Image: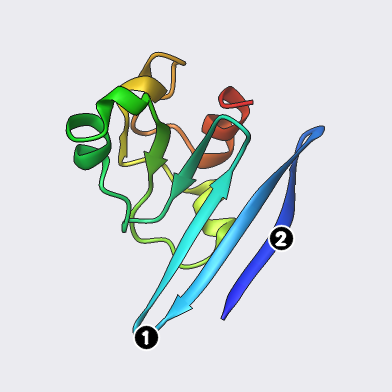
Amino acid sequence: MVTIEPIVIGEHTVIGVEVKLPKTTLLSISTSRGYIMCGALDIGLLNEKLGDRQIIAARAVGVRTLPELLAAPLESVTLEAESLGIVPGMIGAEALLRML
């Protein structure tokens, strides 16, 4: 099952996506410029193999719901996200605001 829902952060609305798969759930929350995602996101791949795309993304691990993803500290971020001041340890909601 796939669930798509608007999420309000301050005065902004972002899009949350939850994909229920066997034995796992994929979570992502996106803006028009970038996104945060659960531990399934491969930051190394985005930086190394897809670096020319300049993807703004960050990863939080151990989250199981969209609210947890918003509140979780980020474990890793892409180089492009770092250029916006998004750093590991920052919570997901704060990173999304920098992606707007």
Q: Residue at the far front: name it.
A: 52
> Which amino acid lies under the numbered mark 1 shown in the image of this protein?
Pro
Query: Dot 2: within a 10 Å radius of its alpha carbon, few (fewer than 14), some, or many (20 or more) residues?
Result: few
SS class, disc 1: loop
Q: Residue at the far right: name it.
A: 11
Q: Residue visible at 48% across and 60% down?
A: 27
Residue 17 image position (x, y, % from top left): 58, 60
Give the quarter of the image for residue 93. top right
The circle drawn on residue 5 is: 2
Q: How is the image coloured?
A: rainbow
Give the quarter of the image for residue 1. bottom right
The answer to whether the residue labelled 2 contacts the one labelled 1, judged by CB atoms less than 8 Å apart, is: no
Q: Residue visible at 32% across and 51% down?
A: 41
Direction from residue 97 to residue 20 in the image, left or right: left
Say which quadrant the C terminus sits in.
top right
> Which amino acid lies under the numbered mark 2 shown in the image of this protein?
Glu
CA separation, marks 2 and 1?
21 Å
Direction from residue 83 to residue 18 in the image, left or right: right
SS class, disc 2: strand
Direction from residue 84 to residue 10 in the image, left or right: right
Give the quarter of the image for residue 47. top left
Residue 38 image position (x, y, % from top left): 40, 56
Query: Dot 1: within a 10 Å radius of its alpha carbon, few (fewer than 14), some, or many (20 or more) residues?
Result: few
Q: State which tag comes first along the sequence, 2 or 1.
A: 2
Residue 5 image position (x, y, % from top left): 71, 60
Of the pair 56 and 84, the residue shown nearer to us: 56
**Disc 1 target residue:** 22
Residue 63 image position (x, y, % from top left): 42, 61
Q: Residue visible at 26% across and 33% down?
A: 50
Direction from residue 82 to residue 1 in the image, left or right: right
